[in-house]
Each structure stands twice: as structure tokens, then as C-alpha cells.
Image: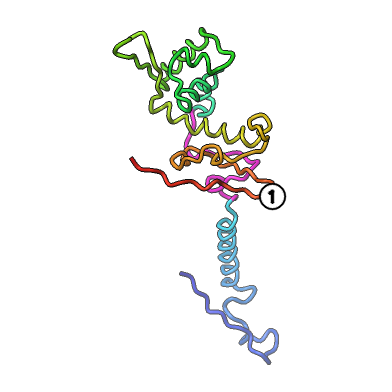
Amino acid sequence: MISFNVRTKMPGRRRGDPSSVGPCSQGSNFYLIYKVYALILDRRSRRCLDPSADPLRYWTKGTPMVPAAPLVSCPIATSLGVLGKKWALLVIRDIAMRRTERFSELLGTIPGITPRVLSMRLKELEQAGIIRKVAQKRSPRLVRWNLTEMGWDALPILMSYVAFGSKWYSKTVFADKRPRDVSAIYPQANLRPFEIDIGVADRDGNVARVARRPAISD
């Protein structure tokens, strides 16, 4: 802890009087040390008050996101290697959110997909560990598709699409063409951890979320 014995100029004394000069007066070594020390403290305080000075502490919109861990490959590009293929997310959507588990059912709920492409996507998702095949004991030919733990981890991705589409494509998504928050579409309390809140304002410009009922524990 550095302390300074500062002697102030007493009233009535002339300028230049040696008795009016203290250890921290201008021109002394103590004064220079004091100014440098004060400058260091000022810079440190500014860094504490300005979070944008540390890119790992705070991110400013429009600036690069600096990762704290060294990346060998982009996690977004790596995930899109499987999830970015056409129809892949819709297959996961139907299995996770609509419980459409059979091949024939998936053909009916995904307009435009062909049996050949659906077979390819199911095989790719299975190889990636996202879905698994479940055969019935009575009829081994009747196969159902379920999500693995890895597949359920894709649920926040689906919910982010729900949030984005409900806000920016509401004229196509909803009959009344009004944008909605995710909580207004899926108000279940235990779905809250999977949602992304991007802020949907009402007609008055207020961002509001629907009150949820408490989750029922198993």
C-alpha cells in the first residue's frame, strides 16, 4: 500500500517559499510517481467500467466473437455437415415434436421428400448417432425411429427456428399474421430451458412473455 504525505500550501505564504513546498509538489520525484500511479489506477478503472475493453468478458454487436478455447474447426460448420442437409432438420422435427416415428408417416408429413432421399437421411442421421432404429418384437419389419440423447440435444436448435420464424415470418406462419413469442406457442414450463428469447414486441412495443404453469415433477 503506497501512501503519500501531502503538505498543502498554507494561506498567507508567498509563492516559491520553501516551507510551502511538499513532497508531492510539482517538479519533485514523489509528484511524478503519484501521477504515474494515478494514471495506472485510472486505466484499470476504465477497463472495469467498459466491458467492451475485454473481448472475452463482453461481446458488442457488430464485432467478432472471440472464442476462449482454441478451435480446430468451426462447430457451426461441423454441425451443418449433418444437420444442414436438406430435410434433415425436418426429420428430427417430426420425430421430436410430432412423434412421427415410422417411414410411411415421415413421407406423409414432409412434403416433397422422396422415399429414396428419406431413406438416405435416416441412414445418415443414424450413422451420426442422432436417431436409432427400434424394431418391434412382433413384427421386425415394422421399424420406428427414436431420438438418441444426442438427437434430443438438437431440440434447442429446432426451438430457435420456431422463435425466428414466429417473429420474422409471422405472416406466413400464423393465420392472424401477428408475431408471437415462443412461450405463446409452447407454454409448457419444462420447455423453457430449450427456448431462445429473441424479444417479440406486441402492438404497444412491449416485449412480454406468457406466464407458464409450474412444471409437474415425475
- The percent position of residue 196, horizontal first and vertical second, equals 54, 39
Per the image, label 1 sits on a secondary structure element best described as loop
Q: Name the image quarter holding residue 86.
A: top right
Q: Please give the residue where the numbered disc 1 appears in the rendered image.
A: 204
196 versus 122 height, above or below: below
Crowd class of label 1 (few under 14; some 14 to 19; many from 20; radius 10 Å): few
Q: Nearer the viewer, residue 98 or 25?
A: 98
Q: Name the image quarter holding residue 61.
A: top right
Q: Amino acid at mark 1?
A: Asp
Tell whether position 122 is magenta.
no
Tell whether position 71 is magenta.
yes
Residue at 66 percent of width and 46 percent of height = 202
Quarter of the picture containing the C terminus is top left
- The percent position of residue 92, horizontal first and vertical second, equals 48, 23
Q: Hey, which residue is sitting farthest front in the picture?
A: 175
- The percent position of residue 17, horizontal first and vertical second, equals 66, 86
Q: Nearer the viewer, residue 156 or 67?
A: 156
Going by the image, does 155 lie left or right of 40?
Answer: left
Q: Nearer the viewer, residue 98 or 7?
A: 98
Q: Hey, which residue is sitting farthest left in the picture?
A: 137
Residue at 46 percent of width and 38 percent of height = 191
- The percent position of residue 48, horizontal first and vertical second, equals 55, 57
Please report the bounds of the magenta region as a residue range: 52-72
